[in-house]
Image (cartoon, rainbow, N blue to C red):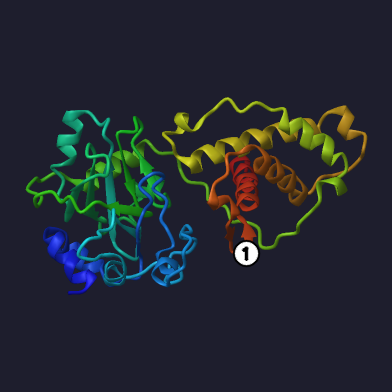
């Protein structure tokens, strides 16, 4: 019996679900590390590499089909901790409603009344994952404008969020089929009313590795930024690393702009380029942030942190226009 067949025998309700059946052949499956929820490069694991790395792409270079995943990892004596799927609209036309353990009972119950196509208990055993079809008019209805480009749509209290482009970690602890008649389009429209419009910005098209010693007063500006205190922590952002990083970059960006306007720096007569500004902040981030493997990756050939700083500058510019 293959690993896939064994897995089907272990989790019949999971495999019998029509939504799971509709996505199981997509090459978008892996396993999430239960400690940090980071998806691993399952392709390298299946190919026999001894060291496990994070999934850096969302295709067959890092991911697999559900059958490939289970065939390579499930045996008569060994199961996998979870099955993680790279969910993305409009490819899948479904979203995941992630209900947090701290969600109040009455709110949780109303959410469980939604007509989900797949439901399960989360890894904590106190939350829920509900898969819901994307509203047909999601891309065109102006009522959804404030959430149409968001990968995560967070409820203001942190009680739940809607994931549209995100890894979903399936525990396979399935819920009974939905029986409620709640309205997901109405919930999504209500969420949209609480969200700020998304400012879209593109990353840099090219990257030059600039030594800060070649930037006028570069070392002085770097040292000034190092002294800046970051008062916010991950806890202030519900452990959302992306939001935390965006906040830290914003603070360094504003501080750097202030330093450059001081008389001590102005006397050098240099007009700083965005490339130089991004280089200075990126260097400070590398030397102050707790390391994450993601920070070592590249986006379209550009170092991830440098790209994030550039995007922060672009969004700030657009917000002022």
Q: In this figure, what is the number of numbered marks?
A: 1
Q: Is residue 125 above or below residue 13?
A: above
Say which residue appears at 63% left-offset and 48% top-offset.
314
Which residue is the extreme one toward the bottom?
1
Give the image location of residue 253, x and y in percent. Answer: 68, 37
Figure quadrant of residue 35: top left
Task: Tell which of 114 and 19 is nearer to you.
Answer: 19
Q: Is residue 174 left or right of residue 39?
A: left
Q: Is residue 106 above or below residue 278?
A: above
Give the image location of residue 140, x and y in percent. Answer: 34, 57
Q: Which residue is mark 1?
A: 301
Which residue is the extreme one toward the front?
77
Give the image location of residue 283, x and y in percent. Answer: 71, 44
Quadrant of image for the C terminus:
top right
Say which residue appears at 71% left-offset and 47% top-offset.
278
Say which residue appears at 48% left-offset and 33% top-offset.
234
Figure quadrant of residue 128: top left
Quadrant of image for the N terminus:
bottom left
Mark 1 Cα within 10 Å, few/some/many (few <14, many 20+)?
Answer: few
Say which residue appears at 35% left-offset and 38% top-offset.
193
Q: Is residue 247 left or right of residue 154?
A: right
């Amino acid at each position: 019996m293959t690993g896939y067949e064994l897995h089907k025998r272990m989790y019949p309700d999971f495999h019998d679900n029509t939504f799971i059946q509709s996505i199981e052949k997509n090459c978008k499956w892996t396993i999430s590390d239960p400690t940090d929820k980071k998806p691993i490069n399952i392709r390298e694991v299946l190919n026999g590499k001894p060291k496990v790395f994070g999934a850096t792409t969302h295709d067959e270079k890092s991911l697999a089909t559900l059958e490939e995943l289970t065939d390579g990892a499930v045996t008569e004596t060994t199961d996998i901790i979870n099955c993680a799927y790279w969910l993305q609209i409009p490819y899948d036309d479904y979203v995941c409603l992630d209900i947090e353990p701290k969600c109040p009972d009455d709110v949780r119950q109303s959410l469980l009344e939604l007509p989900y196509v797949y439901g399960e208990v989360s890894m904590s055993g106190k939350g829920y994952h509900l898969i819901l079809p994307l509203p047909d008019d999601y891309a065109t209805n102006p009522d959804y404008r404030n959430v149409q480009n968001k990968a995560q749509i967070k409820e203001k209290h942190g009680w739940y969020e809607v994931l549209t482009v995100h890894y979903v970690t399936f525990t396979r602890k399935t819920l009974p089929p939905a029986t409620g008649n709640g309205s997901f389009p109405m919930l999504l429209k209500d969420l949209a009313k609480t969200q700020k419009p998304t400012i879209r910005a593109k990353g840099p098209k090219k990257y030059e590795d600039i030594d800060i010693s070649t930037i006028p007063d570069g070392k002085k500006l770097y040292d000034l930024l190092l002294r800046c205190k970051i008062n916010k922590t991950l806890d202030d952002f519900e452990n959302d690393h992306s939001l935390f990083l965006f906040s830290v970059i914003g603070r360094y960006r504003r501080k750097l702009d202030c330093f450059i306007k001081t008389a001590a720096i102005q006397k050098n007569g240099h007009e700083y380029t965005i490339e130089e500004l991004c280089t200075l902040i990126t260097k400070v981030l590398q030397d102050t942030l707790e390391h994450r493997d993601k920070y070592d990756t590249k986006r379209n050939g550009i170092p991830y942190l440098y790209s994030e700083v550039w995007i922060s500058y672009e969004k700030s510019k657009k917000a002022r226009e």
